[in-house]
């Protein structure tokens, strides 16, 4: 399609991040498909070519400072987790992309945030799954923790593909 429309397409994913594509495009990095020069009006496009990731937020206890939230986000960041501290209104969260959710899934991410929060004199208010997760990732979490971790069998990719209804845990 890139060739037919004349729009270069960069591919990003496990080896090359989207911010890196933005920095290097047409300078030291060339499109994966399509022409080697930007389209005059459309520029270029980028397509993610990575395995599935899970977007997951852990909300910190009210009264947690931004500095503490940033420290926690930095502490849990690593090769399998991208994280940052975000303020949403008066509340703070550690917002994470679980890059390899089989290696570091929601339970482990939550537990790490909670451990660092405790060490810094605060705690966790709640968790939030953003979107869906693979069934295999859910299966690795003990069912007894699903409500605490904001997980549910109706919020898997497979459930949505099969048309199963979304079931949200009651708090």
Image (spheres, rainbow, N blue to C red):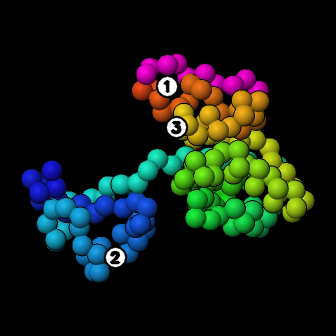
Principal SS element in the magenta part? loop
Label 3: few (<14), some (14–19) or many (≥20) C-alpha neighbours in 10 Å: some
Compared to residue 3, the image places residue 31 above or below, namely below
Q: Is residue 103 left or right of residue 51?
A: right
Query: Which structural element holds mark 2?
Result: helix
Residue 87 visible in the current orientation: no
Query: Which structural element holds mark 1?
Result: helix
Q: Earlier along the polypeptide chain: callout 1 or callout 2?
A: 2
Compared to residue 44, the image places residue 91 above or below, namely above
Q: What is the x, y in percent for residue 98?
A: 58, 52
Compared to residue 1, the image places residue 67 above or below, namely below
Query: Circle 2 is placed at which residue position?
Result: 24
Look at the image and say whether residue 9 sits in the magenta stretch: no
Look at the image and say whether residue 167 sits in the magenta stretch: yes
**In the image, which disc is placed on residue 45?**
none
Query: Circle 1 is placed at which residue position?
Result: 159
80 or 91: nearer the viewer: 80
Per the model, the C-alpha gap separating discs 3 and 2 is 32 Å
């Amino acid at each position: 399609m890139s060739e037919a429309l004349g729009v270069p397409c960069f591919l990003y994913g496990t080896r090359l991040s989207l911010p890196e594509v933005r920095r290097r495009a047409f300078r030291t990095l060339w499109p994966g498909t399509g022409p080697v020069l930007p389209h005059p009006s459309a520029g270029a496009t980028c397509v993610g070519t990575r395995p599935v990731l899970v977007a997951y937020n852990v909300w910190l206890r009210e009264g947690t400072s931004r500095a503490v939230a940033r420290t926690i986000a930095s502490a849990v960041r690593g090769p399998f987790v991208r994280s940052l501290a975000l303020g949403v209104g008066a509340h703070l969260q550690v917002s994470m992309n679980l890059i390899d959710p089989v290696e570091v899934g929601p339970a482990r991410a939550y537990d790490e945030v909670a451990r660092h929060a405790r060490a810094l004199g605060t705690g966790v208010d709640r968790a939030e799954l953003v979107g869906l997760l693979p069934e295999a990732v859910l299966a690795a979490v003990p069912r007894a923790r699903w409500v605490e971790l904001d997980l549910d069998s109706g919020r898997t990719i497979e459930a949505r593909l099969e048309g199963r209804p979304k079931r949200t845990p009651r708090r």
